[in-house]
Amino acid sequence: MPETMTAPEPVMDTQPKAQELSLQGALNLALDEILAEDPKALVLGEDVGTLGGVFRVTSGLAAKHGAERVFDTPLAESGILGMSIGLAMAGFHPIPEVQFDGFAYPAVNQIVCQLGRMNYRSRGTLPMPVTLRVPSFGGIRAPEHHGESLEALFAHVPGLKVVSPSDPQQGYSLLKAAARMPDPVIFMEPKSRYWQKGLVTSTESPADVSGARIARPGKHLTLVAWGAMVSRCIQVAELAAEDGIDIEVLDLRWLKPIDAEALATSVGKTRRAVVVHEAPRTSGLGAEVAQIIIERCFGTLKAPVERVTGFDVPYPSGDLEDEYIPNIDRILFGIQRVLEYKRG
């Protein structure tokens, strides 16, 4: 090469890399990056260290980051939350796991009376940067207390934020966003979707994950859902499209605070709405969502807001779960009721 010439600078690929991961793998990746980026981050819970968690979301993290940062706790949910609150007061960023949603009940006192109130009680001097991971909802035919929908309970508690991802990309991005917040976040992971795969783009700063997102655009009706029900609603929308019905699917994502503007924008366009969730119908979060829609869109709605939900019984075990969780037929029937509604 002549002395007057210089070698060209190597071209760096700055585009974020996408890889196919399950929701479980995407959450594991997010936790790995959180621990690497934040020396104050800690992961704790029953069997999260040596075993890697029941659903293997924390697999390999203890070996990589050390047993002092990813560690097992006694089988006491009140102790896990109490320890996490104390660690947050000492300046750490704990990410505790409650092994199953139904196991959270013994820790409700800590969650309601301390985790949700400490920042308020201390006039801002003791923030609570705690991200509580809760494998949630049904769909795996587990025994009693291994399938619950506690979103309405947690959303009712002042001081808490509540979020539920619907797919691997949302799991990765929302968990990283939650871990960076100074507020306590209840992170409800749909356990029936842990093995669902999808493309995940990992970036230095996750894309904007505030508020709701349009999972599928449409113009005739809005299906509102969160967690595992988002994928089911997309299935329903694709089936309805075969009959010429164009359905929009709104993934609520944040169950507290609820993105009222996104609800108003979507339903203001379609003028019809069906809310779908697994939890029991009475006092479920769907009632709050429906009321927000009514308040924002009353003058343009062509039909009352319909709810397709679980029943007012505990999550059943085994095959009965298929009857309890809103299925495709029940959701389609709800859509039909709204589309065929006639005033007067």
Image: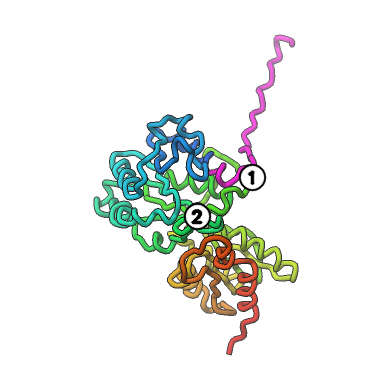
The residue at 47%/71% (across/down) is 312
**Which disc, if any, is residue 20?**
none
Residue at the (53%, 46%) spot, across then down: 173
Q: Is residue 266 visible?
A: no
Q: How many marks?
A: 2
- Residue on which the image places disc 1: 199
Q: Amino acid at mark 1?
A: Leu
Magenta highlight: main SS: loop
Residue density around tag 2, few if under 14, some if 14–19, many if 20 or more, within 10 Å: many
Q: Is residue 326 magenta?
A: no
Sequence-first tag of 1 and 2: 2
- Residue drawn at 52 percent across, 40 percent down: 28
> On screen, 285 above or below 80?
below
Q: Nearer the viewer, residue 248 or 63?
A: 63
Residue 186 horizontal/vertical position (percent): 42, 53
Q: Residue at x 62, y 82 (%)?
A: 341
Quick one: which residue is furthest to the left in this view?
Answer: 122
Q: Disc number at residue 164?
A: 2
Q: What SS does tag 1 mark? A: strand
User: CA gap, disc 1 to disc 2?
Assistant: 18 Å
Please state if 163 lies on the left or on the right of 115 as rendered: right
* Residue stretch rendered in magenta on the structure: 1-27
Provide residue 239's location: percent of width, then percent of height: 71, 66
Between 321 and 92, the residue placed more toward the observer is 321
Q: Quadrant of the N terminus?
A: top right
In the image, residue 16 lies at what x, y percent? Answer: 61, 38
- Please state which amino acid type lies under the numbered disc 2: Ser
Mark 1 surroundings: few (<14), some (14-19) or many (≥20) residues within 10 A:
some
| Label pair 1/2, CB-CB below 8 angstroms | no
